[in-house]
Image (cartoon, rainbow, N blue to C red):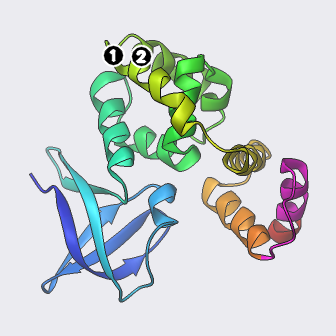
Amino acid sequence: MIAFLEGILAESLPTQIVVNVHGVGYQVLIPISSFERLPQIGASVKILTHLSVREDAHVLYGFCTAGERDLFKLLLNHVTGVGPKIALAVLSGLSVEMFKSAVVAGDTGTISKISGLGKKTAERIVLELKDKVGVAAEWEASSSKNAPSEDDIRLHDAVLALISLGYKQVDAHKAIRAVLKTGDGTPTSEELIRQALKVLS
């Protein structure tokens, strides 16, 4: 099993990267949450990985944090009907902390807004993860320490609103980042959405 890759970041796209490890290029599929933490192309990088072995392919999935990889594996191993594609969508749509808070609170509405997920899948995720012994209890115990900040909530609300308007998840994240780079104070979710729509148009 490949636990991690350490090398040079050779290629970088929002959904996949190539890591050059001693002259061998490893293609790795990643969530947007990890893409946002990547260094510049040509820089050293360490990516935690999960290897999925199928009949027709061996696919590497990569993550910048252990929390992302742990959640990815939890979704694959404990939620019926959730494969790598949906697990990556979950990580791209919500931070690990916000996802855990949503599960503990039974907030299927927030989870169902993630691109590629519907209401039934969101309900199944909440039901099956809350049913796992210790998972919900552990998350609940840590939720006060690791609760998403007001900034996290504003950003994710804005991204989810743009997705619900029909924009792609990748484009929504890019637009919000572009707005934040202007550094105009602390915009509300509504202001973020309004300014992001100008960027997208």
Q: Which of 145 and 135 is in front in this view?
A: 145
Residue 184 sits inside the magenta stretch = yes
Query: Which residue in the structure is indicated by mark 2?
Result: 137
Q: Nearer the viewer, residue 164 or 44?
A: 44
Q: Which amino acid does label 1 sit on?
A: Gly
**Cα separation between marks 2 and 1:** 5 Å
Q: Residue furthest front?
A: 145
Residue 118 sits inside the magenta stretch = no
Regarding residue 151, the answer to whether it shows in the image is: yes
Q: What residue type is labelled 2?
A: Ala
Q: What are the residue bounds of the magenta stretch?
A: 182-197
Q: Label for residue 134?
A: 1
Q: Where is residue 38 in the image (x, y as percent from the top left)?
A: 44, 72
Helix, strand or loop under label 2:
helix
120 sits left or right of 159 in the view:
left
Regarding residue 80, the answer to whether it shows in the image is: no
Q: Is residue 49 above or below residue 141?
A: below
